[in-house]
Image (spheres, rainbow, N blue to C red):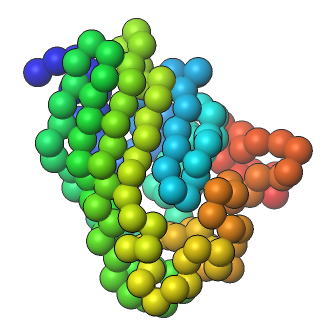
Amino acid sequence: MHPNAELITRFYSAFAARDHEMMARSYSDKARFSDPVFPSLDADEVRAMWRMFCVSGNDIAVTFSDVEGGDERGSARWEASYAFPRTGRNVDNKIAASFEFDSGLIVRHVDSFDPLSLDPDGAWPGRGTPGVDPGGPKPGAVPGRRPAGALSKRGNEGR
């Protein structure tokens, strides 16, 4: 297995085990992340996002498959299953992930999924961030982020 495919495998294995510190170590300090909910995060913000998901207390199950990795690019499919906080409805979010690597670390990570699959009853978008706070910020906002600042590497301390 290519070392970058191993990196992706370690990353999602860490997510399944809620090990945000291992996930954080997978990213370069120059990394960028985007998905339909968080369209533009820098390395510190994406590390804080994974920490938030891992320590949120939500009963999330993560599985992954179809891991591929080469010298510069990689991909995987993963699924997050959990109860949507606002409605309690079960969500099975199927995600296609693409990666770019530099020096054995993730420098670009894009997750693609249908945002309407998160809450078919219509609580999203605009009524909270899925899996986080049903009354929280609109999609694209980073929970705990002050308009003029960014999330710390440790998460939302100091809110």
Measuring from the top left, give residue 33's x and y in whole percent.
52, 38
Question: What residue is shown at x 58% (from left), y 21% (from top)?
Answer: 30
Work out which residue is located at the far left of the displayed protein and give it: 1
Q: Is residue 93 left or right of residue 45?
A: left
Total marks placed = 0
Q: Is residue 71 left or right of residue 156?
A: left
Q: Is residue 145 above or below residue 46?
A: below
Observer-nearest of 87 and 59:
87
Question: What residue is shown at x 63% (from left), y 63% (from top)?
Answer: 139
Q: Quadrant of residue 137?
A: bottom right
Measuring from the top left, give residue 40's x and y in whole percent.
61, 42
Can residue 25 be seen at all in this image of the molecule?
Answer: no
Q: Is residue 94 above or below residue 96?
A: below
Q: Quadrant of the C terminus?
A: bottom right
Q: Quadrant of residue 153?
A: top right
Question: What residue is shown at x 49% (from left), y 34% (from top)?
Answer: 24
Can residue 15 be seen at all in this image of the molecule?
Answer: yes
Measuring from the top left, give residue 128's x and y in whole percent.
63, 74
Q: Quadrant of the N terminus?
A: top left
Work out which residue is located at the far right of the displayed protein and give it: 148
Q: Is residue 21 left or right of residue 41?
A: left
Q: Is residue 159 left or right of residue 108?
A: right
Measuring from the top left, give residue 16's x and y in whole percent.
30, 52
Question: What residue is shown at x 29% (from left), y 71% (from top)?
Answer: 92
Q: Is residue 36 above or below residue 26?
A: below
